[in-house]
Every structure is written in structure tokens, then in C-alpha cells.
Image (cartoon, rainbow, N blue to C red):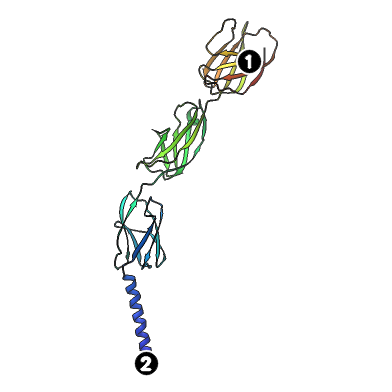
Amino acid sequence: MRTIITALMLSLALCSTAYAEEDFKEAPAILSIIPGQGAPGTRVMISGAGFSPESIVFLGIDEIQSKLISSKQISFEIPQIAPGNYALYIRQKEGASGRAYSFAISPVKPVALSLAPDSISFCSSGDERQINVKGKNFLEGSQILFDGAAIKGIRVSAEEMLFNAPAVPGGLHQVQVKNPEETISGALGLMVTNRPEVRSISQGNDYVNYYVLEIEGINFQQGSSLMVDGKKIQSGQLYPGNRDQLIYKSCSKMTYHRYPYDPSSKSLQMMVVNPNGEESSVFTVNAP
């Protein structure tokens, strides 16, 4: 009797093993795919039935890495492949394939996160105008869009691009990254400041009836004027009855020829005003 029971138990165990092996060979069924499309790097969840450690996920003809969560769920991350429609299906190892579903791979969208620096002066030059764009998904062939127009940029990595800010008027300007598939990042703001700033005023050569004040700073413009104790001295212009003269030399330097009526030194309040009306802070200097 014991021999018969043992034989029966062995037979049941073999049948159970056979069923388990048969289960692995059954075609897995896909009931839902969330999301139904996506860009490379997106995590996709497949729900269905018949999933096992033997289940293999395919996109097109390529096997992709997947993670078995349970017999009803399996997930994968969309690999870095070209945009398009692919057949998505699951096949049991050495077994049947389930039904294939069309899965759309969309172009990866660049993401611009920050600019460094995010503000430059109007008259900055050279390396001072180099802007570092930080983000992700910058592909080979990506471009910089400055106020909507493509300009020259350098792709350092998938997370960094460099460009030199073009000569533009002061104000807020938009910077975006455009990938070769025409996807465009959101816009970041680059502030170009054109407010004049006086950093120093020093006395230069002293002539018979006038002397020179050298004014240094940033964002001086052709046509800027100098307010001296409320009196306006316009660069490049002389007014009747006023011999004082302001000479524009560069974005960072102007020369003031002052004809004093009194040789004694006193406190002078000076301020630079640009043609657009932007004013520097008041700078105080002791001079005749």
C-alpha cells in the first residue's frame, strides 16, 4: 500500500512539473501598456498574464532589458533608439510569443535647466560673454536658439552646451536648445544689462585753463552724457557758453575736459546717463 501511495505522489509531482514547464511555454498575454508611447529613458509598465522569469520583452527585433515584478506585471525602460513605431511583444524563452502591439518611440526632448552666468553686461567681451547651458538630453548636432534664431554653440556633453552671447540690445533674451529631431527645450532667460556704472574717476593731465577727469566703468555708450552737479555734459557736443567737453572712448572709458571757474577743490556729484535714459549711481569726486 505504501508503495502505491509513493508512486501516486511521484506521479502527481511529475505532472505538476510538467504543467509548470508548460506554463512557461504558454504565450504571455498583454492587457495594458502604460504609457502607450514615450521617449528614450521613459519607464513603461506592462500588465497582463503569464509573465515569468523566462519572459523576454522585444521592441522590433531587439531584445531589451526588463524587470519582472510579478506574473502579471513587467516593466522596462525605453532604450536609446531612433524615433518610430516598433512592435512590442513578450516571448517566453524557448516558447511562444504573445501578441505584438504597436509602440511609438517619440524623439527625446532636450531639457534646459540653468544658465551660467544668467546675466552679462552690454559691453562685456571675450570670455565674459561665454554662457554655459546645463540640462539633459542634448544630442549630437544640437543647436542653441537665441531669441528663436539658431546661433553657433558647442555640445560638451548630453548635459552641457556652450555659446557666446551675440551683440544684442539690453534686456531679457530667450535661450533654448534644439535637438536634431526638431524637439526644443523650454526657454531660459539671459539678462543683458545696459545700465551704466561708474567705477572710478581720476584726475589726469592739468592744462592752462582746464584739466582732465578720466571716467572708468561699464556700459557707456556713444551718445552718453555726464551730469555734473545737475548740469548736463553731452559727449561729442559743445553748448554755447559752456566749454566743458565729454569724450566717449569706449564702453568702459570716457574723458571729461573740465574748465573750472575756481581752482579750489570741492565735492562734485557726477552721474552717467545713457541715450535710453538709464542712469548710473551718483559718484562723488573732489576736484576743482
Q: Is residue 78 rendered to the left or right of residue 189?
A: left
Residue 225 image position (x, y, % from top left) = 56, 16
**Is 288 located above or below residue 284 in the figure?**
above
Label 2 crowd bin: few (<14), some (14–19), many (20+), radius 10 Å: few
Location of residue 198 in the rendering, given as x and y in whole percent from the top left corner:
59, 22
The kind of residue tagged 1 is: Gly
Does 165 appear above or below 210? Answer: below
Which quadrant: the N terminus? bottom left
Q: Quadrant of the C terminus?
A: top right
Give the CA separation, mark 2 to mark 1.
Answer: 119 Å
Mark number for residue 173? none
Can see residue 85?
Answer: yes
Circle 2 — which element?
helix
Which label belongs to residue 3?
Answer: 2
- Residue 129 image position (x, y, % from top left): 48, 31
Location of residue 194 in the rendering, given as x and y in whole percent from the top left corner: 53, 25
Judge the density around disc 1: few (<14), some (14-19), many (≥20) Cα neighbours within 10 Å. few
Instruction: Identify the mark nearer the N-term, 2 or 1.
Output: 2
Residue 151 visible: no
Q: Residue at x 38, y 47 (%)?
A: 108
